[in-house]
Amino acid sequence: MAAFEGVDYYALDELLNDEQKLVRDTVREFVTDQILPIINEHQREGTFPEEALPVMGEMGLLGANLEGYGLPGLDNISYGLILQELERGDSGVRSFVSVQGALCMYSIWRFGSEAQKEQWLPAMGSGDVIACFGLTEPDAGSDPGAMRTRAERDGDEWVLNGVKYWITNGNMAQLAIVWAKTEDGIRGFLVPTDSPGFTANKVTGKYSLRASDTAELVLQGCRIPAANMLPDAEGLKGPLTCLNQARYGIAWGAVGAAMACYDEALRYAKNRIAFGRPIAATQLMQELLVECVTEITKAQLMCLRLGQLKEAGTVTPQQISMAKRNNVRMALNTARTCREILGGNGILDDYQSFRHMVNLESVYTYEGTHQIHTLIVGHDITGYSAFGE
């Protein structure tokens, strides 16, 4: 099969600079050569492709848009293109990079002390230290303010008690960023996973994101030094600021998943012969394919403008929510359509579309459900909050 060349119906390459194209093409080659040949095995086994970790660290894919501490400091469009290409491989791979960089590294980079930054960021950027982000709980997902995890000060230590759920990277992590309620409100804590009272349990039975490490974190009298609290994160603004970093990357990543499905379905339709001609020659298939490439193109334009706004420092959380909401729904619909074009073959893991489709069911839900992002944008455009009091 010919190498993947991307989907660019509106010649958006002309709007990228040479560095951005080089970053994208380098990650595209990495995904083609080192992720796609192994992803089906990990999908079947329900394991994360840890063998790719050293290369991702060497390539500077972890915290790629953060500056200082030995990190690449790439512009935000280059960063978005990295996540686009990673999710073309698998949502689980992109999720790993999003959690490591946009949630965990950004938490420390934005809210940590200088000592915390120097201790953790270089090792996290190289992949020598893997981290997870402990916000979601069994009964507190869309409403993180309802969290039950608590942290109490005891002399020179904090003592944490609670349970976090659906935590990406949780079993493989050496560091957890845990958000907990204190007497002074919600605060963030750096919790080494070998701390007494910390346990991670693998979440099993997943149909989706099978190549992603998902855990339950249990903190029972978990003691950490007082210095492990993030000093500049107070209230829900801290974790929500980090979530916006991740949601930005998801908007780009979803485009990569859609591109993978569309490229596969287009190639298939050109080569699949039915009733004496390629199915691509039929009006029915052309309508489906045109709808896919149109929606991908619209999402690409949204990403590019979003990246420009983020680079200028003027992007709003609501604009990020709109992009996450639109692009993930687009990608999920594209994957479903492409699976339809593949016919019965579409359920085989010889093809990508079904794997992307089930993965995107999770992406549709995490980092703010589709409906939550609807309410965020709805509040912004009307001035009325539809969230419960």
Image (spheres, rainbow, N blue to C red):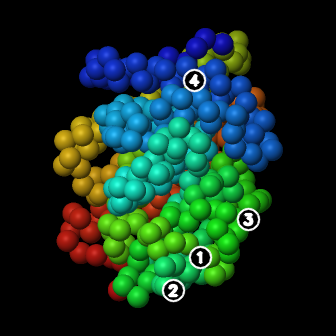
**Which secondary structure lies at badge 1?**
strand
Query: In this rendering, would 203 be left or right of 283?
Result: right
Residues under numbered marks 3 and 4 in contact, where contact means CB atoms less than 8 Å apart = no
Q: Mark 2 points at which residue?
A: 154
In the image, which disc is placed on residue 208?
A: none
- The answer for how far apart the CA atoms under marks 2 and 4 are is 48 Å
Q: Name the residue under label 4.
A: 30
Disc 3 or 4, which lies upstream in sequence?
4
Q: How many marks?
A: 4
**Which secondary structure lies at badge 3?**
strand
Q: In which quarter of the image is the C terminus?
A: bottom left
**Which secondary structure lies at badge 4?**
helix
- Tag 1: amino acid: Arg
The answer to whether one can see residue 235 in this image is yes
- Tag 4: amino acid: Phe
Q: Where is residue 267 in the image (x, y as percent from the top left)?
A: 60, 18
Quarter where residue 237 is shown: bottom left
